[in-house]
Structure formats: structure tokens, C-alpha cells
Image: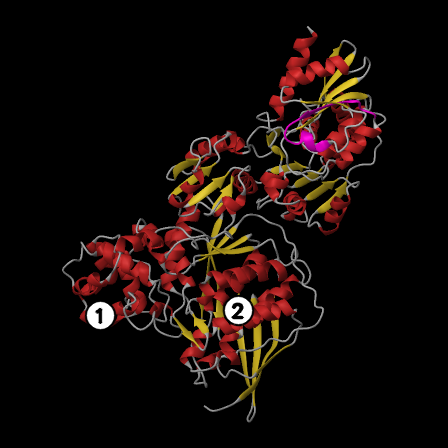
Amino acid sequence: MNLKATIFEFTSYKFIPSQKRILFNYKTEFKVGEPIFFTETIILPEIPNLKEIPPGLLDKILQGLHLVLGVSYFKCYCATKVKINYLLSKNESNFWNTVYKKGLGEFFYRNNLDPKISPKFPFGKNIKSVSYQINNNQKCLLGLGGGKDSIVSAEILKEQGFDVTNFFVETQKESNLVNEIMGITGINSLKIRRVLDEKLFYKHKYQGHVPVSAIYAFLGIFYAVLYKYSYFIVSNEYSSNFGNTKYKGEVINHQWSKSFEFESLFQNYVENFITKNVHYFSLLRPFYEIRIVEIFSKYKKYFSHFSSCNRNFIINSNENKSLWCANCPKCVFVFTLLSAFLSKKDLIDIFKKNLYEEEKLISLFKDVLGFGKMKPFDCVGTFKEAKVGLYLASKKFKNNLIIKTFLPKIKNPETLKEEVFKTNLALNIPSQFKFSGMKNVLIIGYGREGKITEKYIKKNYPNLKIGIADIKINKNYLKEQKNYDVAVKTPGIKKNIVKINYTTATNIFFSKIKQLGNKTIGITGTKGKSTTTSLIYSILKNSGKNVRILGNIGNPMLNALLDTVKKDDILILELSSYQLDDINFSPNIAVVTNLFAEHMDYHFGVENYHLAKQNIINFQNKEDIFVYNPKVKKLVLWAKTAPSKTIPFIKDNLSNYKTSLIGEHNKENIRAAITVAKTFNVSDKVIKKTIENFKGLPHRLEFVGEFYGIKFYDDGSSTTPESAILAIKSLKNIDTIFLGGEDRGYDFSQLEKTIKKYKIRNIVLFPDSGKLILKNEKNFNVLYTQKMKEAVKFAYKNTKKGKICLLSGGSPSYSLWKNFEEKGNQFQSIVKAIKN
């Protein structure tokens, strides 16, 4: 047919919920002759409840479905122009241009068409993108077919206890093969049916491959939103990233819509234009297909039921009596990989013959092994893993024709083996799924949290081999990474030095707690988070609630999961910027006390530090709460764009409260705690009594005692210039101050001005930052020292009676001490020893 198409129009779509149907309409217009109309119908398994879906979201998903389903009809004539009846932003247009161009790459190649004819989607100017918010529930929707990959995903998710439902897209007819596989998994299963327009099967100008996995991706997200799933999981492997050939400057990949490139594009599309609350990803992305086959070989119950042969999925054909045609690239490739792990008997029982003895298959094996002209246009993996599969099977099949023909041609098989069995980076897999399919795990950092992490993994993942990497054990500890599939990184380890797939104990904790459904309260801030965390805990505990205090305050979060977590347990978490830096979750209630510059060496700048802190709210939803200090401008800005409800600290002047907590910053901590307590409807009586009985935490403006008329205060937890300033303003009557510690590049100019303003005379300066604090020592009595005993003696000698000596470093303690607790304890013990 020589009809020249001029316009392909996405004319309309119609959702009829009561009939469980959606109709998608298309039209191709020609330079000469009548237009052709197409209609595709999607049939849902049950009538959906649309009440909780935000206005606009449903249309946005249906528009995406309209565009992706249209690829099957556009390619019949490849019109020179496309027309749509709704507006796209420029970024959306770019997405669709890419999907059509790369998704139809094989189609263009086979039809000898220039990819430049790929449609250019129109876009409107100044179209604002909207991402809709829906509630998370941690339920998983798994795309299931009849092949080994999705079976492996189903079994892994089931073994790890995820709430998972199988999802299958039927096209035109029911698949007995898939029905059998769904039944064997023992997992609840649901299906959507595609009814293609019958005219699609007429003879048209062009025919060929379409990016069907992209179509399934959109259908899966649609289903997830409609029926409330948080994850749509597919089973695309690392091998799918590799193309078949080059054509007119473009890499042609039969599996492009299974590739990581498409996965990343689609994830961004869903996040920016649909919702951030449903996540699409491939569970098996880190693995070459041969490693997936190795896992599959353990599931013998599927051997006589599964099939990856595409002839089982040809539309409008009778289902094959045999599951394997034994005469296509897919059959040859899967046979080769399975031969590495299965017995001869099991393998031949599956394929009904030994493909290694088939002379007629030599050319197919040649192509699959990489000795032919190009990789076959089929869902087959890489040449390297095919070679390794044949190499590993060579002893079992050593006298077979195919082995004798090709084994001598395989160079460096052991090197290839090492490569294809390694895991590859897949950082977009959510944290709770990071251990899926892994053989071993490396714990990087073996302090208190690392040791608890080890216990947790041993209890919950007994088959994972555990390795330990810590600078105290081996100064070259980071080199251990190359020998492991995945790592669990301790918060103090910078994320940029971890080179393999990793998660953190914080993410593991949140992922499990989200599944359990417990309420979480997370508290962060440059200063005040420990006091605020403890105060919230005390108020809620005194109100009769079951509460547990965890996190940076000294009790690793995974500790809680080593015990039984009760349904009504409220988990109160102190969260540091280290823990928040690469978190994938947010607490139900997020509290931020304040923001200064801190940990610059870790975060590489104040902006990155603030971005890490902001993660405490970034993954919240509309049912969650952000409690913030309205006196901090940055937090006010966060509140304007927060995805959750926002509540500023109460404005109470606290005149009715008698408290031992000193300073305006502690008043803010109290206001934060009261604000949180009010969200739980705690009575004013309980709040007041708790605050008045609350003792301040050690090393936080802690009164050590009065000796020889001098009052000593330990503010050892002060690690920034701002926190030292707050301490000075809180106590006022200071005559001697101890400052200095590890040099983090802080600006001390405001601290020096404050010291002068409050007329502090005696200054003790510890290395390394001590020498940077005072630009002008005039009118100060200064002692530079490395010894706390010398400093305390100086204080006793020079501090006026009735005045205060304050330890408040304004820098981290690590230059001379293990931590601020060690510094504070040393200060207190020497103060008390000398007075005696």
C-alpha cells in the first residue's frame, strides 16, 4: 500500500468506570483517500473506587496511556505529523519524542526508514508540570509473564515477606501459560486486558516491533494508582541495556523499553508528571541474565510450566502445544544459560530435545554467542554470558556438536565468568529491595550501629554472607567493596566513596516500619535535636502512650527490629544529617529545630547540608506533618513547598512553665515538643508537669556545680560557632570560656563579636580551630593548650567569684577527644577533682 499519511491524531479517550472500560481513539489521515480510525479498549478486572484520586491525576495518566498505546497504530503508516488534543510541557514532549524514536528503532531499521521521521510531539509554552500526591501503603504490584525473570522476582519478594500482587496484561486472549505460573506462585493475581483494534491486523504499509514494555509500564502505573499500590516492579535485567546494531547513527536495541535508559526516563516522567508516591523499577537490574537463571534453577516447580519462547505470546494465534519451539534465538539462549546449572535430564525434559546436538541450530548458536554478524532481534542477553553458559556446561555436554564447535572459540572464559556474575550499579532500586537476589553484603563501618546491623542481617537474611569493612580493622577497608554484591553504609561514611549498590540502617529501619504501619516522629536540626527528642518522648510516655526512643541519640534504630514492635508503638527518632543524607523515607511527623552550618567536610558545603536535612520532609505525604521553627527563614520556605501538613512551633511565651532548661534555644525546643504533643491531644496538665520535671541532657548547658564561688557549666555538645553563641547568650554572666576543637572551616567572626559584647575576659583555646577563633587577642587573657587539666586550673585561677566558667567548644571535639561526651566528662571530673 502506497498511501502517504499526513497526520496521525490522538483523537480522544473515554473512561467508563461502571463498564470497567477505557476507549482510546486514533485517526490516520492521508494525502489522498479516506482516513482510518482505530480504537483500542482496555478492560479492567474490577470497578475502581475513584473517590481518593486527586482531580486531574486520572486524566494525566490516561493521556500518557493514550500516547503510548498509539505507537501500535502510528507505525502502520508513519504520518509526517502528530496531533494531540491536550497540552504537553516541553519536557513531556521530549520524553515522548525519545520513546517513539528509540522504542521504534528496530521498526525503522527493518523497514529501511530513517529514524528522523520519528514524530515530534507538540508542546505549549509555559505549561507547568504537576505531580499529584496520593497515599503510600508499601504494597507491591509485580509485572508477571510466563518467563523465568518475573518468576524469580515473585519468589524473591515472597521469600522476603513483601505484600505483592501479580499483574499481567492480556492482549486479545487469555494466556493459559501465565495463568498456570500465577497459580504456582501462590500470590494473588490481577489482570488487565488489551483489546487491539481488529484493523491493526489488516495489511498496512508498515509492520514491525513496538516498545511493548513501555506500554506495560504505563498500564502498570495506571493500575497502581487506580488500585492503590506504592510500587510497580518489573524484572528487566542488566543485559537488556546492550543494543543489537547501529543504524544511521542510532543504537538499535530490540529491548530498549526494558533498558535502564528507559527505566530512568520513565521514573522521572512518573515522578514529575504523575505522582512521586508510586515508584517504577526493575528488581533484577543489577544482574546479567545468567545470574537470574542461576537463581531460577532453584525453583524446580516451574520447570515444566514456564516459557520464554515468544511464539507463546503471538497475538491471534493458537497457543502452542509445546512451550518451546526449540528453533529461535530465545530458545537457544535460554537453553545455553540453563545448561550451566541444570542436570542434563532436567534440561531435556524442559526443551524435549538436546539443542546442543542439533546441526540445524549452528547458525543460531553462532549469532547468540557473538560469532555471527549481529545480536539477534530477540530478548536475548549478551554474548559474554552466552559464552559463559556454554563454557560452564561443556563438561556435561562435552561430546555434543555445538560444544565441540564453539568451545574452542571462547577466549578467557574465567575472566568472562567473573564479569557476568558480578552485580552492577542500580541505585534507583528502593532500599527495602536492595538485598533481593544478593549473595553477600558488606557492612562498611563497624561501630555501634554496624554491629547492630550485623545482628539484624543475620536474623532476617540468614543466607547472606556478611563481610566487615572498617578503618580500625584495615586501613584499606574500602577495597573490600569489589568482592561484594551490596553494602550497608554507616552514617559517618561519605556516600561518594561507596562504589557498589548500598543501603543504610536508617533506610532498612524505615522500610520495615512503613510495612508494619507504626507512627514515627523524626527530629533533626543543627542543635537541640537531642533535647527535643527526649522531651517529646517524656511527654508522650507520661501521657500513657507506648513510645520508644531511637536513632542518633545513642540507640541504633535496628535495635527495635531485633525485638517485637507492637502495633501501637510510637517510634521517636533523633536523625542526624548523616542519616538523612541518603534517606528514602520521611517520618510521619518531622520536626526541625534550627539550621546552622555544620559538617561542611562531610556534605561539601552548607547547601548540601541543608538539602540533607530537608530529606526529613521530602518523602512525606499529605497525611503527614511538618513541625518547624517559624523563626528560621529557610524552614519557612520549606513549609511553603512541603508535601505534608505544616505546623509552626506554638507561640507560647512559656511564662507558666518552671523549667531547668536554660536559654532561648531551649525555649524553642520546648515549644517544638509542645507542638508535637498537641497533635496527639496530650493534656496541658501532662505537658506542664513533664516539662517542669524534665532534667536537661548531659553536656548541654549542664550545671556541673559551684566551687570557690565559680559556677561551672558543661556545654560539651557545642560543635558550631552558632551553638557557642547560643550558650553565651543563655548564661550571660560568663568570665571564662573554653573553645576550639577540630577545624571544619567555620567562620568564627560572629562568635568573636559575641565574646566581646558579653565581655568575656578569659579564653582557653584548644587545637586545631582554637588558633582561628580570635583575630585580635587584645584585652583577652588567652591560654592555648591541649590539656583539659591545665585549662581548668587556668579557670580556677582567673575566673572572678560569682561568675561562670563555660565549656562550649564551638567546634567538633575530635581533635583531642573521641567525642563530645568524652570531652565533657573529662571537664567535669577535673573540675570536681581540683575543687577538692
Mark 2, secondary structure of its residue? strand
Few, some or many C-alpha atoms within 10 Å of disc 2 (few <14, some 14-19, many ≥20)?
many
Few, some or many C-alpha atoms within 10 Å of disc 1 (few <14, some 14-19, many ≥20)?
some
Q: Estimate the x, y position of residue 312 in percent, counting from the top left.
A: 35, 68
Q: Residue at x 78, y 36 (%)?
A: 750
* Residue most extreme to the left: 399
Q: Which residue is mark 1?
A: 362
Residue segment shown in magenta? 759-773
Residue 683 seen anywhere in this rendered image of the structure: no
Magenta stretch: includes residue 771: yes
Q: Amino acid at mark 1?
A: Ile
Q: Amino acid at mark 2?
A: Ile
Residue 147 seen anywhere in this rendered image of the structure: yes
Residue 833 relative to residue 349: left or right: right
Q: Say if 431 sits above or below 196 in the image.
A: above
Alpha carbon of mark 1 to alpha carbon of mark 2: how far? 42 Å
Q: Which residue is mark 2?
A: 42
Q: Residue at x 31, y 48 (%)?
A: 298
Q: Estimate the x, y position of residue 420 in percent, counting from the top left.
A: 34, 54
Q: Nearer the viewer, residue 323 or 550?
A: 550
For the N terminus, the quadrant is: bottom left
Residue 37 relative to residue 105: left or right: right
